[in-house]
Amino acid sequence: FPATWVPLRLYVLAAVGLIISNCPGTWKSHKNPINTIMKQFLVHVTLSDEWYRVFFGEKRVGLACFVAFSYFIATTSLVITARNVNGISALMLLPSLMA
């Protein structure tokens, strides 16, 4: 799995970095999409790590399916938000959604 997930994680990091570097505004603005992107990115990474721990570490298949479904929803939300800010970043996030 590391041969698959490491490049996907790098694509996600590059996509979020591209959004942050191209997004105007200040960090303290409530309407700034960077705040939303960062929250969704942190949820995405957390659920990704949690799925791995629950499925391979604890071997709880039912809970792992629930976490994987939550991961899919979080990643879909991240892709949609990224599309509204930067289309190239959304394309970079698609492999992670399909995995």
Image (cartoon, rainbow, N blue to C red):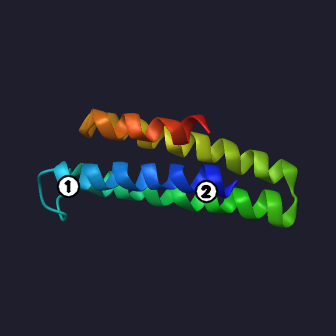
Q: Which residue is drawn at 61% across and 56% down?
A: 48
Labels 1 and 2: the sequence-earlier one: 1
Q: Nearer the viewer, mark 1 or mark 2?
A: 1
Q: What element carries label 1?
A: helix
Left or right: residue 96 compared with residue 32: right
Outermost residue on the front side: it is 3
- Tag 2: amino acid: Leu
**Is residue 63 something that shows in the picture?**
yes
For label 1, count other residues whose C-alpha is less than 10 Å away and answer few (under 14), some (14-19) or many (20+). Answer: few
Asked if residue 51 lies left or right of residue 11, the reply is right
Question: Left or right: where does residue 97 sit relative to residue 91?
Answer: right
Please give the residue where the numbered disc 2 appears in the rendered image. Answer: 47
User: Where the C terminus falls, by quadrant?
Assistant: top right
Q: Which amino acid does label 1 sit on?
A: Ser
- Give coordinates of residue 66: x percent, y percent: 74, 46
Give neighbour class at mark 2: few <14, some 14-19, many 20+ (Cα, 10 Å): many
Q: Position of residue 45 (x, y in %)?
A: 53, 59
Q: How far apart are marks 1 and 2 (CA)?
A: 25 Å
**Farthest residue toward the left?**
25
Is 18 drawn above or below residue 99 in the view shown? below
* Res 92 quadrant in image: top left
Q: Name the residue under label 1.
A: 21
- Could you say where residue 78 lies in the image, as x and y percent from the top left? 43, 43
Q: Is mark 2 on a helix, strand or loop?
A: helix
Determine the residue positioned at 24% across, 55% down: 20
Q: Tell me where residue 17 appears, x and y as whole percent.
A: 30, 56
